[in-house]
Image: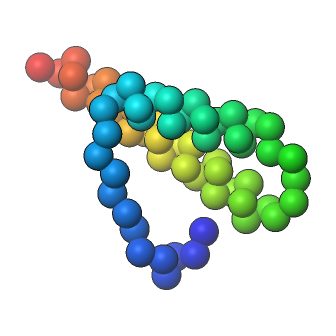
Amino acid sequence: MNPDQIAATLTMEVDALRLLHRVVDNAYTNWPGGDADEQACLLLMKNQLYAALMTHLYETNSI
């Protein structure tokens, strides 16, 4: 990923977040090869989505 790119923020329900994580994980797991930057981007996205899920879980159980 290019560090000069503009960051974006998404707002979604947790079910959509889980689905998006599953889709990105599937794309990473079944990556057919090619541009290594694409694979690295998928891994980064997968990890960031997982972190968002864990943050949500922590925050909802801390109340």
- For the image, the number of numbered tags is 0
Residue 32 location (% of width, % of height): 87, 47
Q: Is residue 57 above or below residue 32?
A: above
Left or right of 31, for residue 5: left
Left or right of 58, for residue 53: right
Q: Is residue 5 above or below residue 22?
A: below
Residue 14 visible somewhere in the drawing? yes
Residue at the (72%, 60%) spot, across then down: 38
Residue 37 location (% of width, % of height): 73, 65
Considering the image in quadrants, where does the C terminus appear? top left
Please name whichever residue, 62 or 32, is drawn nearer the observer in this view of the structure.
32
Residue 29 location (% of width, % of height): 76, 36
Residue 43 location (% of width, % of height): 64, 48
Residue at the (80%, 45%) spot, across then down: 31
Coloring basis for residues: rainbow
Considering the image in quadrants, where does the N terminus appear? bottom right
**What residue occupies the far bottom of the structure in this picture?**
4
Left or right of 37, for residue 61: left
**What residue occupies the far right of the structure in this picture?**
33
Residue 54 visible somewhere in the drawing? no
Residue at the (88%, 53%) spot, across then down: 33
Residue at the (57%, 43%) spot, across then down: 46
